[in-house]
Amino acid sequence: MGRMNGLVLSLGALGFGILYLPIIIMVIFSFNAGKLVSVWSGASLKWYAGLLKNDQLLSAFGTSLLIAVWAATIATIFGICIAVAFVRFGNFRSRLALSAIASAPLVMPEIVTGLSMLLLFISMESLFGWPSGRGVDTIIIAHATFGMCFAAVVIQARLRDFDMAIEEAAADLGATQPFIFLSITLPVIAPAVVAAWLLAFTLSFDDLVIASFVSGPGSSTLPIVIFSKVRLGVTPEINALATVMIVVVAAAVIGASWAIRRRLSSRDQNQ
Amino acid sequence: MVRGMGKYLVNLPAVTGRRLVIALPLIWLAVFFFLPLVETLQVSFTSPRRGIPPYEPLWGIGDDGLFTNFTTGNYALLLQYWSDYFGPAFNSIKLAFFSTLVCLLFAYPMAWWIARSNEKWRTILLVLVMLPFWTSSLLRIYALIGLLNPNGFINTAGLWFGLIDAPIQMMQTDFSIYMGMVLTYLPLMILPLYAVMIRLDADLLDAAADLGGSGVQIFRTIILPLTLPGIIAGSLLVFIPAVGEFVIPALLGGPDQLMMGKVLWTEFFRNRDWPVASAIAMLLLAILTVPIIYARYQDGRDAVAETPNPKRVEAG
């Protein structure tokens, strides 16, 4: 199968090339003194300096950060509830309803979610006067809603692997359910909870479409500002911003997978 | 019996706690996910107006009692201007379908490569696949524009090396859309494929080779059937979001690449025709119902087939 391996390797390498070439070129040209992403006119950090002085981008960054932290926190708490209900509660009456309504947002096109959320907020406002206008709070609600479904999937997988005998032993020894959950279950599933929070955070921080529908004046998130700048043409400051964000994410992902690998190998040695 | 009842009484707070754990997410999702879809369905049957909000209420109680503004006009309009609206529907499906195929073409060998590597390389390659997934897709598409522009990196490099005489038009074509789709959705295709390939028994392949099976034969009779679940799962994960994709056709496509997400956006933000935008949303959902239900059915089967891994339970 030597010939096939050659084909596999070249197509695979091409695939990695498509994933990484745009990013690598962008990172290199973020240090370009000129405006174009093609002609090198000397090294410079001026776009990074410009970034630090760009109040619009900085305040949008702050807004996105605030929204993502709140949305991820709400999403993780509700995601734990959904996962516990599915894995621990057996066949409760509303199981089918919950499983349908908790998995549909995973596959719903963003543009439909965004539009329908906005229509709901508007009719709620005319009925009860809440939420008055759209802003940070409506974006948090929208992001928490789809975030909790992704969080539930991540936590569910971990909860399923967890040995129920430990919980049962604790219950036989007289521990109450909330106590068991807080002192035994939660510490064991903690890595999955952290992963779920990070996933919900990333989904919220990167979302353009849903936020565009449910945002109001003064609540422009970073993707909304980036999108409007990109539409207007080349803005080298975005190269610098993207480079910073990619370096941060890469450091986090590589660090996390290194930590997981180390934990797994030390666990293997203990066994 | 008595002991059982006593246990129930002791657990009374736990039973209400259980109800709360189920009810909280159920109510949240009913209010913020299900109700919005009902509201969108309602708005898709009303007519637009000048004002805030820019549509008539579907029904209400006025001075003369109950009134309705029911109209099927938005859907009639979708039918009537089929070249403007249904065209995009087919365009969406066509572009999403071929994007899924192109993703599969690259993802299959990539997943195979990862699954057949030794453990150290497997971790490195998997991180390389996951990394773009955690970075903003908007920024990755922006990076692609820098590559494909008429004065972008590829054209400049091609001209400089004398490979081309004039810049090639790559932006605003089907090509740029496919590139954007591959860039965005490739990890979603690789991961389910990798999951089935890593479970593939290497002895099977060795046995087939020992018995004189050619590469093509082994692929067709063993590898392809055994990786089919991964192909289906990955294809659904790519196809469903690709049909409603907005950012890619908006930034990489030209005026001809009218995908449904872009038409919905234009109707909503530029023409401020919210009822027609709602009707397009409903049409989009109708088109995606079959793949979405099929994906859920597959998920259910996987969950049933999934058996707890004893080793991991022990470790946990």
Image (tube, rainbow, N blue to C red):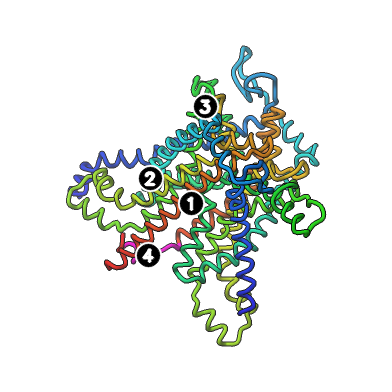
Q: Secondary structure at mark 4?
A: loop
Q: Secondary structure at mark 1?
A: helix
Mark 2 burial class by Cα count in 10 Å: few <14, some 14-19, many 20+: many
Furthest toward the top, the residue is B63
**Label whose residue precedes the other's in the sequence (2 or 1):** 2
Residue A133 x/y as whole percent: 54, 22
Label 4 and label 3: CA atoms lie apart by 45 Å
Which image quadrant is residue B187 in?
Answer: bottom right
**Label whose residue precedes the other's in the sequence (3 or 1):** 3
- Tag 1: residue type? Ala
Name the one closer to the observer, A161 or A54.
A54
Q: Which residue is mark 4?
A: B309
Verify CB contact (< 8 Å) between mark 4 and mark 1.
no
Is residue A75 shown to the viewer in this render? yes
Highlighted magenta segment, given as a residue range? B305-313
Q: Nearer the viewer, mark 4 or mark 1?
A: 1
The numbered dot on residue A80 is 2
Mark 4 burial class by Cα count in 10 Å: few <14, some 14-19, many 20+: few
Where is B79 relative to A193, above or below?
Answer: above
Q: Secondary structure at mark 3?
A: loop
Label 4 and label 1: CA atoms lie apart by 31 Å
The numbered dot on residue A250 is 1
Q: Are marks 3 and 2 on the same chain?
A: yes
